[in-house]
Amino acid sequence: MRVSIPAWEFDLPLCVRSGQAFRWRQNGAQWIGLADAEVLKVEPRGSRWIVQSPTSETPFQLLTRLFRLEVDLKKVQTELIRRDPRWAEWIEAMPGLRLMRWLSAEECLFSFLCTPANNIPRITGMIERLCERYGEPIAHEGEMTYYGFPTATQLAQADEATLRELGFGYRARNLIEAAQALQERGDGWLDSLRVLPYWDAKKELMTLPGVGAKVADCVLLFGLDNPLAVPIDTHMWQAVSEWLMPDLKGRSLTDRTYRQVVEWFHERFGEWSGWAHQYLFTAHLMGKEMASDHA
DNA sequence: ACGAATCCTGGGCA
DNA sequence: ATGCCCAGGATTC
């Protein structure tokens, strides 16, 4: 089954390179994405994206879930600019940027456990090797095999030495212990956090090994559909302290300043905080990439 | 509450 | 060549 959607609906390359997903590859003009146990292929044709999937009968629904195509992009952008005109510049520069959504909160959690003190190219490789080693094959194409993301049960049985060989470093133990913690708390524990108030869900997540404030916010925002989550990493901290909250300039990111920034977003953007974060984060990320390209 | 050191690894850079 | 710094942090002291 093949379907198509207008290209202006979302800028796929920008979305999947803005730290919201780690399993998309460019293959010529085509983009191949893996999510949980699904494979999605997207390529441009004229002014539309052609979408197909070897694993799903309903690739359009899959794409809709991943890129939140049910959300009216223009409306979000208008709303953000109305609440703070400074967002206009970033929206104009990245009109197709969307907040993404992971199919599986578990996959989201395990993936972001790989991110602390790390960089995107390395994270991408780590996750690829993790799936090849512990995931189930989900599709074949000639010599090529696609692997699904390993389950908590599979990861709980992994051993630290193997993960370290795969390049996980000190994060190996967090991955295994978090998987074991999920097993102990039972199926559905993670997804049950969807219905908790933001600060309560965040506090719960932070009881998992390796999950601090930033990783918790990533899991809440991308994996658990909580629009109030505002992940603050080095990029966000720089962007916020330089461009938005000059009082924070020169200070360091602590529990207190982290909470201050989150509350600033909540007061200003409310339920749109997560979207606001994504435009700001990506603006800073891309700005820095462009700066280093010319260096 | 805050700052500093530690943790794996790879790349860029002096 | 070698060391240092940093990369989407968390944890401990």
Image (spheres, coloured by chain):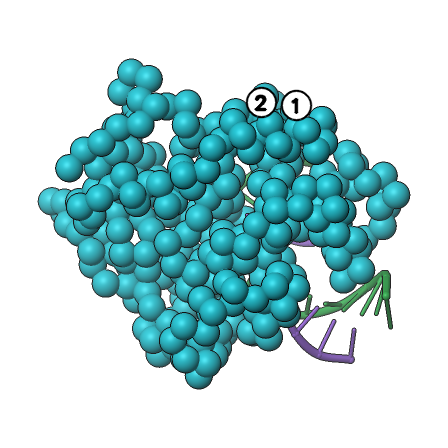
Chain colours: A cyan, B green, C purple
Q: Residue A112, image x and y in percent?
A: 51, 58
Q: Is residue A195 visible?
A: yes
The residue tagged 2 is A93
Q: Residue at x 24, y 41 (%)?
A: A59
Residue A26 quadrant = top left
Looking at the rendered structure, the secondary structure element under dot 2 is helix
Q: Residue at x 71, y 26 (%)?
A: A85
Which chain hosts label 2? A
Q: Residue at x 51, y 72 (%)?
A: A174
- Report the Cα–Cα distance between label 1 and label 2: 6 Å
Residue A89: mark: 1
Q: Amino acid at mark 1?
A: Glu
In which quadrant is the N terminus of chain A drawn? Answer: top left
Residue A265 quadrant = top right
Left or right of residue A139, residue A48 in this image: right
> Please, is residue A179 above or below residue A47 in the view?
below
Q: Residue A234, image x and y in percent?
A: 68, 47
> Please, is residue A22 above or below residue A86 in the view?
below
Q: Are marks 1 and 2 in contact (CB under 8 Å)?
A: yes
Looking at the rendered structure, the secondary structure element under dot 1 is helix
> Within 10 angstroms of label 2, few (less than 14), some, or many (20 or more) residues?
few
Q: Nearer the viewer, residue A224 or A171?
A: A224
> Please, is residue A277 above or below residue C2 in the view?
above
